Image: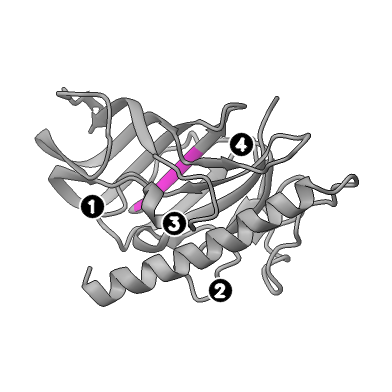
Amino acid sequence: MGVTSGVHERAWYLATVALVLGYSATVACSANTPGPTAPSPGLGTVRPTGPASGTTTSPQTKPGVELTVVPHSDGSFDITERVLLPRPTDMLQLQLPASGDQLPGMMAPTKPQVTNLKVVADDQSVPLETTSVPGADLIPLTVAAAELQLTYRLSGSTVFASPSATNRAGAAIRPLTANTDGSLPTTITVTSGLLNAVCPLLSEPRCAVGDPPHLMVRPDIPAAKALVVLQLDLPR
């Protein structure tokens, strides 16, 4: 990505995080917290085929990324990332969603990190030197593979609304493998608590579709643009 694209991406990201998390903080201060923000106009007619808590278990038949995100009360997420590439690769490029210096100065800084990483390539476990991903990283595969599955814990990517009597929070999510093939259509499933979603790299950034309580993130976003800022009520 060029310097200009990187600047534009950061500008979009900062403005959107400020908007979404600012909304979270505002509603948290109210004695009568309103319901979730309505999805984008024109997208509300798109409905999920099942409850948001459902996970995809059928084999992937077309190239793409499927991200299943399970929130926890402490703001961390257990994530399963299933990837089917159009052609085999022997190297994975990994990239965390965002770092603290990419968030507005008035917000609490974030330091996203990945732990408990496990990688399976074409049904074979990939030996890793470390199961933590503190930033950008490259993982060599023992053999070239097209079908990949990553499981990991993402932490440090959440900002809690304050003061708040609820577990309302904002968090940035992005496929760990987004840089491996940025053209892959990406579908992100949040299993609980989703109130709104903003995709700052899309021309239509508000990307929550469906109706509460079965709100979902718009499917088939290109992996390179699948940076999603979630507004959530985390489980207690």
Q: CA distance from mark 1 to mark 4?
A: 25 Å
Whether tag 2 and tag 3 are in contact, CB under 8 A, the answer is no
Q: CA distance from mark 1 to mark 3?
A: 15 Å
Say which of 106 and 86 sits in front: 106
Residue 128: x percent and y percent?
17, 24
> Mark 1 or mark 2, which has the lower sequence index?
1
Asked if residue 108 lies left or right of residue 152, the reply is right
> Mark 3 or mark 4, which has the lower sequence index?
4
Q: Up-down: is 106 above or below 119? A: below
Q: What's the residue at 50%, 76% (across, down)?
A: 203
Farthest residue toward the right?
A: 32
Q: CA distance from mark 2 to mark 3?
A: 13 Å
Q: Amino acid at mark 1?
A: Thr
Q: What's the residue at 25%, 27% (across, down)?
A: 123
* Residue for badge 3: 227
Say which of 147 and 224 sits in front: 224
Farthest residue toward the front?
A: 106
Residue 73 magenta: no
Question: Start and end of the magenta stretch?
Answer: 64-68
Residue 204 image label: 2
Q: CA distance from mark 3 to mark 4?
A: 18 Å
Residue 120 figure quarter: top left
- Which of discs 2 and 4 lies nearer the camera? The answer is 2
Task: Provide the major secondary structure of the magenta segment.
Answer: strand
Q: What's the residue at 66%, 34% (across, down)?
A: 234
> Mark 2 or mark 3, which has the lower sequence index?
2
Residue 180 image label: 1
* Residue for badge 4: 191
Asked if residue 7 lies left or right of residue 197, the reply is left
